[in-house]
Image: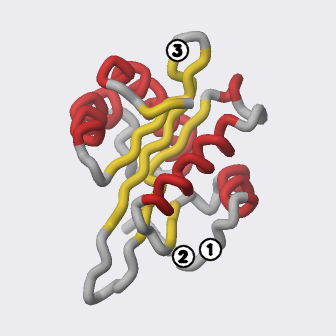
């Protein structure tokens, strides 16, 4: 695991495409599963330049096999705490259950602490019980629930 570099962008796009296809694409009919291939390179390039963003890659034999992206949000009058958001996390299926995700989350939590965050948050689909259990094992707990219905 390491901080992402510009040359990792194709691997980050592929990792993000895996996340969209496996997670959102199977649980949310309103998500554009093509977004990573259409906009991911630009999005990751901007994130790599943003000091308030963290982009990590899980590297196996020179190949990106997972990623984590996070950000920090300043305190505001509405929410007077500095917080960090785990925006996306994905590890290729053949590299799961080896502690890769845990190491990525651990690095994110250390980074958030170092950036002065007082809390961290992540969003997961309620139907993705594996992800929910993973985040709960790392100290996250449900705080809100979004209810949605098609029109």
Q: Earlier in the sequence, mark 2 or mark 3?
A: 3
Kindly state the secondary structure of the residue where label 3 is placed. strand
Question: Is residue 102 rendered to the left or right of residue 125?
Answer: right
Quarter of image, res 100 = top right
Q: Is residue 16 above or below residue 139?
A: above
- Which residue is label 2 attached to? 145
Q: How far apart, in angstroms, are the residues tagged by discs 2 and 3?
A: 36 Å
Q: In the image, which is nearer the foreground, mark 1 or mark 3?
A: 3
Quarter of image, res 8 = top left
Q: How far apart, in angstroms, are the residues tagged by discs 2 and 1?
A: 8 Å
Q: How far apart, in angstroms, are the residues tagged by discs 1 and 3?
A: 34 Å
Pointer 2 with pointer 1, Cβ within 8 A: yes
Position of residue 117 measured from the top left corner of the image (x, y, whole percent): 44, 68
Residue in the picture at 35% in, 33% down: 36
Q: Is residue 74 above or below residue 94?
A: below
| Quadrant showing the C terminus | bottom left
Position of residue 68 measured from the top left corner of the image (x, y, whole percent): 49, 41
- Which residue is label 3 attached to? 63
**Mark 1 surroundings within 10 Å by alpha-carbon count, few (fewer than 14), some (14 through 19), many (20 or more):** few
Q: Is residue 133 above or below residue 32?
A: below
**Mark 2 surroundings within 10 Å by alpha-carbon count, few (fewer than 14), some (14 through 19), many (20 or more):** few
- For the residue pair 132 and 116, the one nearer the viewer reads as 116
């Amino acid at each position: 695991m390491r901080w992402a570099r510009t040359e990792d962008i194709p691997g980050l796009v592929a990792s993000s495409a895996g996340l969209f296809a496996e997670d959102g694409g199977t649980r949310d009919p309103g998500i554009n599963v093509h977004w990573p291939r259409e906009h991911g390179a630009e999005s990751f390039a901007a994130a790599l330049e943003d000091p308030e963003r963290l982009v990590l890659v899980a590297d196996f034999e020179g190949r990106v096999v997972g990623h984590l992206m996070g950000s920090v949000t300043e305190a505001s009058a509405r929410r007077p705490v500095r917080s960090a958001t785990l925006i996306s996390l994905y590890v290729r299926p053949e590299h799961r259950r080896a502690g890769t995700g845990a190491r990525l989350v651990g690095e994110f939590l250390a980074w958030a602490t170092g950036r002065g965050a007082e809390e961290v948050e992540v969003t997961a689909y309620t139907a993705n019980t594996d992800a929910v259990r993973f985040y709960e094992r790392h100290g996250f707990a449900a705080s809100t629930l979004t209810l949605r219905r098609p029109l």
